Image (spheres, rainbow, N blue to C red):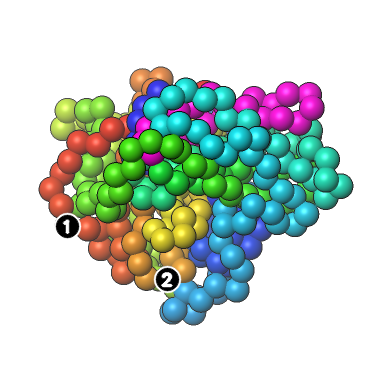
Amino acid sequence: MNTALRVTAFTAGLAAAFGLALGVGHATGSGGPSPKPAMAGHAEHAEESGGGAAEHLPGGLQVSEGGYTLSVENPFVTAGSPTDLRFRILGTDGKPVTAYQQQHEKELHLIVAPRDLSTFQHLHPTLSADGTWSAPTAVPAAGEYRVFADFTPAGAAGGLTLGADLHAAGDLRPAPLPATGRTVTVDGYTVTLGGDLKPGRSSRLTLSVSKDGKPVTDLQPYLGAYGHLVALRAGDLAYLHVHPDTTTPGPEIGFTTTAPSTGSYRLFLDFKHQDTVRTAAFTVTADGTADPAPTTEEPAGDHQH
């Protein structure tokens, strides 16, 4: 497991609110991921308006949507202590949902991030017969966290991303968003961000991966794609999971995006190499410039396989 740099939002109307246009990669029979249309329920594309005005709430801001509710069994935990995070998705009839459509090799993706966006965990919980999901985890520090459940119920036309609060007791030490610049390192890998995040209009981001000064050209598929990008908006933690529109195994992973507004964002890139998933995180502003800072070594994000 890795610790923090990274992030997923499959929600109807999300891009209309969060505004990121998606290219979804998936594993093909020939071995490599290839692009396909945006995943059902991920997003509806926003019209370019220049100001990025949203007509719908971004994903992850609501605990209940479309008749489905995220119910966390115990939202109170102790920082640094292992816990079994248990939750259920309640359906339109108030009963736990027990059948889901698989999306990107999993029936449900779980993201855990603190309000200060300093860390990130991408977990894959297990489902019991009674509809209870469970995932062993530990939050690293005291504070307020957001839990995002990204899923598509069986038979549903589209997916949802529901969010709920998680409260971690301990010694709270609030911190500002970490400054990263356009280059970060994680576990000896260097990841460079190219392109600008633009409010209200489509733009392209490329993330290039290298190791020991050499481009990495043999990335491995992770959850059906060569990279996954999660964006969280500072202030309200509006959430989105984007998949690449490139199909080559590195060194560049490309994404097409549209930000809904100006402001600060955290971008979390998941990539897999030498059988290990790592996460690189960037702090950027919606006008397209990364916060100026020297290259820094940041801990990797947490994963559960």
Query: Percent from the top left, x then y, of residue 1?
Result: 40, 23
How busy is the neighbourhood of tag 1: few (under 14 within 10 Å), some, or many (20 plus)? Answer: few
Q: Is residue 138 magenta?
A: yes
Cα–Cα span, label 1 and label 2: 20 Å
Q: Residue at left 44%, top 78%?
A: 51
Q: Residue at left 26%, top 40%?
A: 191
In this orientation, does residue 78 appear? yes
Which residue is under mark 2?
Answer: 261
Q: Is residue 93 above or below residue 250?
A: below
- Residue type at mark 2: give it: Ser
Which residue is under mark 1?
Answer: 292
Q: Is residue 99 above or below residue 241?
A: above
Q: Residue furthest top?
A: 275
Q: Is residue 117 above or below residue 140?
A: below
Query: Percent from the top left, x then y, of residue 248?
Result: 41, 38
- Residue type at mark 1: give it: Pro
- Badge 1 element: loop
Residue span colored magenta: 121-142
Q: Is residue 34 above or below residue 44?
A: above
- Answer whether labels 1 and 2 touch (C-beta < 8 Å): no
Task: Tell me if 282 is positioned left or right of 142 in this view.
Answer: left
Task: Tell me if 43 is positioned left or right of 302 in this view.
Answer: right
- Badge 2 element: loop
Q: Residue at left 46%, top 55%?
A: 237
Nearest to the observer: residue 38 or residue 246: 38
